[in-house]
Amino acid sequence: MTRKHNSYSQNSPVVENLCAKCVENSRIDADLYAKYDVKRGLRDLNGKGVLTGLTEVSEIRQNKIVNGETVPTDGKLYYRGININDLISGFAGDGRFGFEETIYLLLFGELPTEEELSQFQKLLASYRTLPKNFVRDVVMKAPSGDMMNTLARSVLTLYCYDSNADDISYTNVLRQCLQLISVFPLLSVYGYNAYNHYQKGKSLYIHNPDKKLSTAENILRLLRPDRKYTELEAQVLDVALVLHAEHGGGNNSTFTTRVVTSSGTDTYSAVAAALSSLKGPKHGGANAKVVGMFSELKKTVKDWTDEDEISEYLRRLVLKDAYDKAGLIYGMGHAVYSISDPRAKVLKGYVEKLSNEKGMHKEFELYARVERLAPAVIAQEKKIYKGVSANVDFYSGFMYNMLGLPKELYTPLFAIARIAGWSAHRMEELINAGKIIRPAYMSVAQERDYKALADR
């Protein structure tokens, strides 16, 4: 078992006192934000993002203009102009896995031919390997309980193995991005296996990936002791990867990618920064919160078909009287969508199929009831400026749970998918390189005189 060194895990009274001073002298009067028309969070008063760039990688649509008025609509998501529903219907209708095709589309702006897809899959498979002894010397050393930290550390360490690490020519950056896309499943699963062994005392096993398998299949193969999985399990995970692969340039981790890329830094640093952003519970950790919330709900609500009892529990959540007392129904609501999240609608159908295979349809029906009842409860108890609907995190955590995936890997799975979008945006930022991204901040500190040390 590994233990954190005391000097890195305990606060001293001196630090506590200094922190109190930092907080006291760092608070800014909230009224000043309105006075100077500051768009906090780069959003206006209606929650709409401030336009800071242009992209062709993806587009989110959630409203339309009718007689000069903005009217909310069912959400739509486009990858390089192609509706995500059509993309998934296309490869699913052919009985194929689609994540690799999606990576190609996001990076290169067009759907691959059969030959191009085959060559691309072989390229990714050839890159799905780590430097000699990397697992032993890096992944297995000082395993962390947080896989996102493990993943970021591994990415930064890979910089040391790249003889052209700082070369930001298009060809070199593309090579780096494709290699990182390929090894993210290995870094994530191996990191979890090391943690599971050294910190939880479980058996350690390291499986090699199979070059003939898709990304989704390899994730399940790497994680499970017997390397076995069903066709439906792999299909559902593949669709989840496609749905999480990209979501516009304005989400926090993708914007981070573009901000850091604009400075001219290396690929490993840019990706590590994006990982650090995604780790935040306001961004990538919501699905684990959904699972935890439902765990308490199932213990609290005696009759899963009693809508009044369910609604009462949801009301307690909103009133900060249940679960983590944060006042949130996790998985409900999104910064962009109001009527519906297209990713949640697609994933819901696949999750229902998986729940039937796993004998968990009653639990799926409970999720569906909460999805239907929650908006009314939120509307009754909160003042909101737009509609509320289930987002992709609402069903993804349940799906991962049915697949037997550990909670420690929920956010890394998000990263395994989203690095496809990060890579596309990094390339687009470099190709259209302009000025370094540098938004303005206004100082509201009062000018004062310097006092000599003896007079303070």
Image: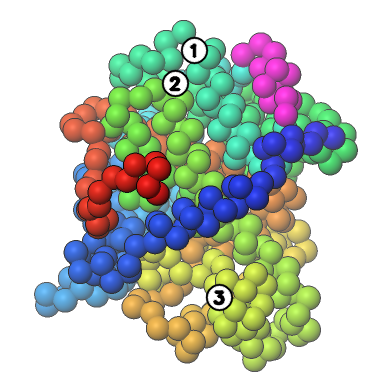
The residue indicated by pointer 1 is 162
The residue indicated by pointer 2 is 176
Residue drawn at x 54%, y 19% is 158
Question: Do residues under tags 3 and 2 come within 8 Å of each other at their CB atoms?
Answer: no
Out of 419 and 270, give the one closest to the viewer: 270
Can residue 216 be seen? no
Residue 370 location, quadrant: bottom right
Residue 362 location, quadrant: bottom right
Q: Quadrant of the N terminus?
A: top right
Of the residues shown, which amino acid type is indicated by label 1? Answer: Asp
Residue 47 location, quadrant: bottom left
Q: Position of residue 309 (x, y in %)?
A: 68, 89
Residue 26 placement, left or right of 214? left
Out of 349 and 452, give the one closest to the viewer: 452
Neighbour tally class for label 2: few under 14, some 14-19, many 20 plus, Cα within 10 Å = many
Question: Do residues under tags 1 and 2 come within 8 Å of each other at their CB atoms?
Answer: yes
Nearest to the eye among marks 1 and 2: give it.
Answer: 1
SS class of the residue under badge 2?
Answer: helix
Of the residues shown, which amino acid type is indicated by label 2? Answer: Gln
Q: Position of residue 411 (x, y in %)?
A: 59, 47
The residue indicated by pointer 3 is 327
Considering every residue shown, the one lying at the far left of the view is: 68
> Mark 1 vs mark 2: which is more N-terminal?
1
Residue drawn at x 72%, y 56% is 402
User: Is 317 one of the magenta-colored residues?
Assistant: no
**In this picture, is 427 found above or below 35?**
above
Q: CA distance from mark 1 to mark 2?
A: 9 Å
Residue drawn at x 34%, y 62% is 28
Can residue 269 be seen? yes
Q: Which residues are magenta?
A: 131-142
